[in-house]
Image (cartoon, rainbow, N blue to C red):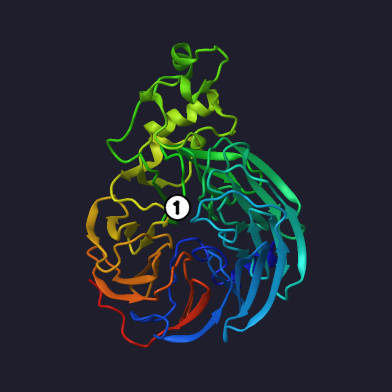
Amino acid sequence: MLLTALAALGADWPQLRGPDGSGLCPNCGRFPIELGPNRNVLWKTPVPMGKSSPVLTGNHIFLTASEGDQLLVLCLDRASGKLLWRRALTAPRREGMHTLNHSAAPTLVTDGRDVYAFFSEFGLIAYTAAGREKWRLPLGPFNNLHGVAASPVYAAGRILLVCDQDTDGFLLAVDAATGKPAWQQPRDVSNGYSTPVVWRDAPGGPQVIAAGSYQLTAYSVATGKSVWWVRGLTCQPKSMPVIANGVVYFNGWTPGNDTGQQVELPAFAEVTAAADANRDGKLAQAELPQPWQPTGTWRAVDLDRDGFLNEREWKFFRSRRASRNSIMAVRLGGAGDVTESHVLWRYEKSLPDVPAPLIYNGVVYLIRSGGIATTLDAKTGAVLKIGRLTGALEDFYSSPIGVDGKVYIASEHGKVVVLRAQGQWEILTLNDFDTPIYATPAIEPGRMYWRVGEMLYAIAGTNAPAPAAP
């Protein structure tokens, strides 16, 4: 265990959004406010298409990608960008997924020594830093409306993977050394896409905190048992939870669940009594009166895809129509349902769809599609500023990062907005790669790595003074 812990310390950006999933890189030096295809570029290397983010350990950069039916793991040299090795798997199947999803959307994780990749069209596979396959664990197929997209995380010698789907969802722990499942915990969820976060110094041992349909749950990494949970999430979590100063922050947004859009639907027994014309105990779409019809596609609520709604599916649909979008701050710890005792505050306006919140020096940063940035006081949830990112009024899927007193935010269309990191933020620069950005950058002292379309850029740090403190 000591060797494993020491190896983990050697991984300086080992997973999505860095060592603790925070998107922060303290003591990483100075960084430029101007960056782009020809600005402050140390090197750039063509890579196959993918939407996963880079991870860093030793002198390596790891990425996933895909070409045709080939699922790829790539290893590049951090100093030069040279491709060191490339390993390919043939996808045994094709999973249905949203156009914004991708066969190589989940980000790898490393323990500082080996690297672990998840592809929804295959499962888990592990390689050494030299590219030798350690083990593989086929998983799936999956039944998720938009495709499984959560990234694996690492804790206490185990790879932890959320496989939320419309039927038979689960949280899986796999021994990182052998690839053997340690435990598998069922999750009664509908579709979800959120990568979990690890609370490493939890009492009694590490806990993995996973957002699911309507509930945020903390599980013991050792046993897989749920320890505590909070109700009140939306049905389709996409953002990643973030831990800061003893609090976990989670942002959830689903279409149709903004404040004032809630609809109270009757219980299943009342609906079947009124609408189940043939008395078969399930509901066909033609049987439902208009006020009870789904606002989206029938497939989104017909979780087992049999053409009817059973009691479980109606319960999820009913909960979905009544749920509220929000970002919430929850004090870590406790046992059982801690909704009433541990929720510190909620905020329900101008919420992101996919990007995770950034908590930087006591300020919460939220980036909503349409180019709206909101800052909140991390302790109270009080609004500090809401404003538009002028010149980047478009969609955002990459999560913001905080470094050197600045916040870097990348849009789908390739704009990178740099903010002065303070509650009353201001735009320092607007940069343009002119190529789509979906991945979140990785950072090390003096260098950033940006995946932009089919190119990986290394951006150099700078010795210029940081922005003045507010």
Quarter of the figure with residue 266: top left
Residue 305's x, y, as percent?
A: 58, 34
Question: Which residue is drawn at the image coordinates 68% and 64% (left, top)?
Answer: 70
Q: What residue appears at the point 50 percent right and 13 percent down from the top-left corner?
A: 277
Q: Quadrant of residue 153?
A: bottom right
Q: Where is residue 362 in the image (x, y as percent from the top left)?
A: 32, 60
Q: Residue 434, relative to residue 232: is it above or below?
A: below
Query: Which quadrant of the figure contains the N terminus?
Result: bottom right
Q: Residue visible at 62% across and 57% down? A: 155
Identify the element where label 1 is drawn: loop
Dividing the picture into quadrants, the one containing residue 107 is: bottom right
Of residues 425 and 299, the one nearer the viewer is 299
Q: Tell me the residue that label 1 is attached to.
A: 239
Name the side, left or right, on which 409 lies relative to 144: left
In front of the other: 425 or 256: 256
The x and y percentages for residue 269 are 48, 15
Residue projecting furthest to the front: 286
Position above or below: 271 against 425: above
